[in-house]
Amino acid sequence: MEISGMIAAGESSAALVYATGRRGLSARQAKIILFGGMMAVAVPATKWMSGSWLIALVSVEFAIFGLIVASFLIQCLAAPAMRRALAERGQPYEQGLTIRLTPEIIVYDLADLTMSAPWSCVTDLYRTRKYWVFLVQSSAMVLPRRFFAAPEAEREFVAEALSRMSDAARSRSPDAVRSAAG
């Protein structure tokens, strides 16, 4: 069984955020720790320097607002920068992706790159809002859900993948089990 479509470079980054959380410390957890550390240092230090808790809290609020604005700008600039960098290297922004499920292996074929793994290496299959993600040891194979013509085709594909995965991998894949059950 196989599924194919076009995927843009960097498109699946959001799906990989969840992959890091399944492997250990997620990006969201790291941001919370950084934010907590910033607050723990910035508020008392500003209070000590200014002598006022009000000034300390206001300055930290402006710092947080600055981080939010900077994050938004980075998101706006990242995609055009990636397109330019790929164009300079002669690589297309969109590439064909095919995922094949065979009895022995899963094959991830992205343009000129092919990865394959025995089913024993697949540790999880989970769904995000827009993607299915196969965790293969420490790597991720990302499949856009839009590749499926109908919900039934998606269910069949997920059921086929689950049938090849180990019991332990299926137990770590409750999204996929629910989807395959309908």
Image: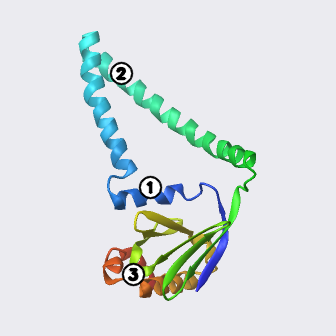
Residue 19: give x, y in percent of width and height.
42, 61
Kind of residue at badge 2:
Val
Residue 133: give x, y in percent of width and height.
48, 68
Secondary structure at numbered mark 2: helix
> In front of the other: label 2 or label 3?
3
Q: Using a 10 Å C-alpha cutoff, classify the residue at mark 1 as few (fewer than 14 neighbours), some (14 to 19) or many (20 or more).
A: few
Q: Which residue is mark 3?
A: 177
Q: Choose between 82 and 158: the one closer to the eye.
A: 82
Q: Which residue is mark 2?
A: 58
> Does residue 182 show up?
no
- Residue at 28%, 33% (x, y): give it: 37
Q: Relative to residue 157, is residue 43 drawn left or right?
A: left
Residue 180: give x, y in percent of width and height.
45, 84
Separation of residues labelled 2 and 3 (CA atoms): 48 Å
Q: Relative to residue 26, is residue 89 drawn left or right?
A: right
Residue 30 in the image: above or below residue 110: above
> Does residue 155 show up?
yes
- Residue at 65%, 46% (x, y): give it: 82
Question: Dividing the image into 4 quarters, which one contains the C terminus?
Answer: bottom left
Q: Choose between 85 and 58: the one closer to the eye.
A: 85
Which dot marks residue 17?
1
Secondary structure at numbered mark 3: helix
Q: Using a 10 Å C-alpha cutoff, classify the residue at mark 2 as few (fewer than 14 neighbours), some (14 to 19) or many (20 or more).
A: few
Kind of residue at badge 1:
Val
Q: Are dots 1 and 2 in contact, CB under 8 Å?
A: no
Residue 153 in the image: above or below residue 63: below
Q: Mark 1 or mark 3, which has the lower sequence index?
A: 1
Residue 138 in the image: above or below residue 27: below
Kind of residue at badge 3:
Val
Q: Mark 1 or mark 2, which has the lower sequence index?
A: 1
